[in-house]
Image (tube, rainbow, N blue to C red):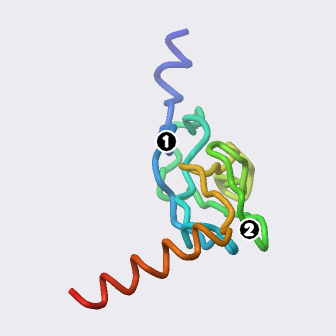
Amino acid sequence: MTFGFSTYKFEKIASKGDVLQSISVSKGTKSHVNLVFENDSGAIISKKNNSHNITHEIKINENISAPVKQNDVLGTINYYLDNELICSTNLVAEKDISKMNFINMFSHISETFVNLLR
């Protein structure tokens, strides 16, 4: 056990609920939704390896349109250390985005018009 603790460390990469980025949503009451990490991300790596060698690859679903429910999987992120996959996590929607309908559209246009007059 002493060898393991002296040779390896846990490298935390991201925490559950951290916002990665905002993506566009078509036909929704909101035009964007935040992508958040579904779970904590991390890996056990050698202490000899520098955490700066960790790279990532983001894959986001194409053509995301409303309705979007909170925690819907909209993509994945893969982490690599020296081109070897060490961790993978789903990227999920932070909030619900409902589909635009006539009532929502009228409210949105009215709100935009009032904001322009301010």
Q: Secondary structure at mark 2?
A: loop
Q: Quadrant of the N terminus?
A: top right
Residue drawn at 73 percent across, 64 percent down: 59
Please tell me whether residue 42 is drawn above or below residue 75 in the rendered image: above
Front in this rendered view, residue 82 or 92:
92
Residue depicted at 61% across the width and 40% down the height? 38
On the image, which quarter does residue 98 sit in?
A: bottom right
Q: Which amino acid type is marked by label 2?
A: Ser
Choose the circle earlier in sequence order: 2 or 1: 1
| Residue for point 57% across, 39% down | 41
Disc 2 vs disc 1: which is toward the camera? 2
- What's the distance in space between the residues labelled 2 and 1, CA to CA? 22 Å
Task: Tell me: 43 left or right of 85.
Answer: left
- Apparent side of residue 96 relative to residue 67 in the rendered image (left or right): left
Amino acid on which the number 1 mark rests in the picture: Gly
83, above or below 48, in the image: below
Q: Residues within 10 Å of mark 1 (few under 14, many from 20)?
A: some
x and y percent of residue 116 in the render?
30, 90
Count of number-bearing discs? 2
Q: Name the residue: 51% across, 58% down.
A: 20
* Location of mark 1 (residue): 17
- Residue furthest to the bottom in view is 117
- Assign the C terminus to one quadrant of the image: bottom left
Q: Where residue 81 appears, x then y in whole percent?
A: 64, 52
Residue underneath mark 2: 65
Q: Nearer the viewer, residue 52 or 31?
A: 31
Residue 7 position in % (x across, y down)? 52, 28
> Looking at the picture, how far across and down is residue 91, in whole percent?
65, 51
- Quadrant of the rendered structure where residue 43 is? top right
Label ID, residue 58: none
